[in-house]
């Protein structure tokens, strides 16, 4: 039998990040579309109407891990490093975070409905 699980999700956060391999990408931030899913350890008791937020995790923490935790001015060669930074932030701030999934679409190179990017899944070590 699989364990019960709570997944928190924030999709399609658009944010500007200094990232890219090529020289023209090293000076100006570019738009990324980032989605984050966190698997959270569930408390043993069920959620009741008056259960406080402390019994879960604020889903806005996921958004802030993307929009507020990336050091301004730091250049990430690969978007994989952006994803790993988001994963590390979410694992560090809450012991209950068991798994983080980050999807990144690089908007500047996506055309005609393409979505070019990565999906990273990290489990707590
Ligand atoms: N797996 C990856 N492949 C590529 C990346 C990346 O970050 N991860 N980046 C680039 C370039 O920066 C490209 O997006 C510029 O057009 C190419 N491949």
Image (spheres, rainbow, N blue to C red):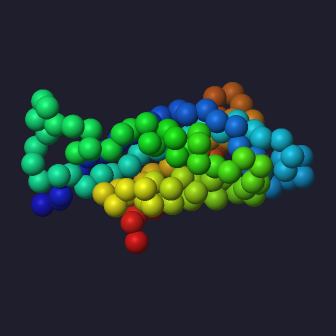
Q: Residue at x 87, y 46 (%)?
A: 27
Left or right: 42 in relation to 112: left
* Total numbered labels placed on residues in the image: 0
Left or right: 123 in relation to 72: left
In percent of width and height, residue 26 lies at: 84, 50
Quarter that holds the C terminus: bottom left
Left or right: 39 in relation to 67: left
Q: Residue at x 16, y 37 (%)?
A: 51
* Residue with the most extreme right position: 23
Looking at the image, can residue 70 be seen? Answer: yes
In percent of width and height, residue 123 lies at: 40, 64
For the residue pair 8 and 115, the one nearer the viewer reads as: 8
In percent of width and height, residue 7 lies at: 31, 45
Quarter that holds the N terminus: bottom left
Q: Residue at x 17, y 59 (%)?
A: 2
Q: Residue at x 63, y 53 (%)?
A: 82
For the residue pair 55 and 111, the one nearer the viewer reads as: 55
Residue 116, quarter of the rendered image: top right
Looking at the image, can residue 115 be seen? Answer: no
Residue 60, quarter of the rendered image: top left
In percent of width and height, residue 104 lies at: 59, 45
Left or right: 46 in relation to 98: left
């Amino acid at each position: 039998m699989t364990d019960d699980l709570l997944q928190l999700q924030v999709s399609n956060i658009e944010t500007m990040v200094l990232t890219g391999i090529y020289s023209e990408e090293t000076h100006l931030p570019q738009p990324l579309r980032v989605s984050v899913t966190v698997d959270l350890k569930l408390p043993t008791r069920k959620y009741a109407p008056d259960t406080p937020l402390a019994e879960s995790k604020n889903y806005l923490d996921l958004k802030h891990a993307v929009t507020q935790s990336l050091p301004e001015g730091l250049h990430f060669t690969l978007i994989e490093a952006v994803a790993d930074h988001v994963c590390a932030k979410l694992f560090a701030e809450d012991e209950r975070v068991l798994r983080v999934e980050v999807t990144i679409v690089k908007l500047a190179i996506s055309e005609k409905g393409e979505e070019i990017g990565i999906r990273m899944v990290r489990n707590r070590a």
